[in-house]
Image (cartoon, grey):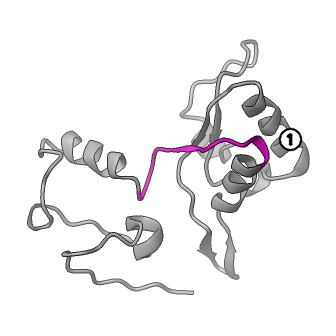
Amino acid sequence: MLAEEAASVVPSDDQRPRDAVLMGLAPQQFHYERMNEAFQLVRQGCPLIAIHKARYYATETGLALGPGPFVAALEYAAGVKALVVGKPERTFFELALLDMGLPAASTYPDVAIIGDDVEQDLGGKHGSMLIQTCKLY
């Protein structure tokens, strides 16, 4: 379940059986039929993979539900735990560091992370970092 622009970069073949459920921010996909299809696939053994589990995000008209509540619904219904591959997971940041040619164990003086939400972008793990943030609603 991805927005059209994100789905266009993920290889897909409608002729092959599904082998994973991938969830990102895709409000138009979060309806009963689509969620139930995902539930059935996960119950059949397909892994549930989430880009992130943000609870909400800001829109021009205010806050809107993010993918997190929908991922949580599938986790609960299917009795599984999603593999989260994006922010704020440590692996996401370690892979980004490696991609930039830095050691995965880099410390905060080496790297700046820009985000608009400490909890959803960094998972609240800001211990010894200098954080400057601005969240507009």
Horizontal side of 114 relative to 101 (left or right) equals right
Which residue is drawn at the image coordinates 75% and 19% (left, top)?
A: 14
Horizontal side of 130 relative to 91 (left or right) equals left
Q: Quadrant of residue 34?
A: top right
Residue 105 pos. (x, y %): 15, 50
Above or below, 85 relative to 30? above
Q: Identify which residue, 110 or 44, lies in the foreground.
A: 44
Which residue is drawn at the image coordinates 57% and 25% (left, top)?
A: 11
Residue 47 pos. (x, y %): 62, 31
| Kind of residue sitting beneath label 1 | Asn
Above or below, 2 relative to 108? above
Within-10-Å neighbours for mark 1: few <14, some 14–19, many 20+: some
Q: Quadrant of residue 130?
A: bottom left
Horizontal side of 48 relative to 125 (left or right) equals right
Tell whether position 81 is magenta.
yes
- Farthest top residue in view: 15
Residue interval drawn in magenta: 77-88
Above or below, 3 relative to 16? below
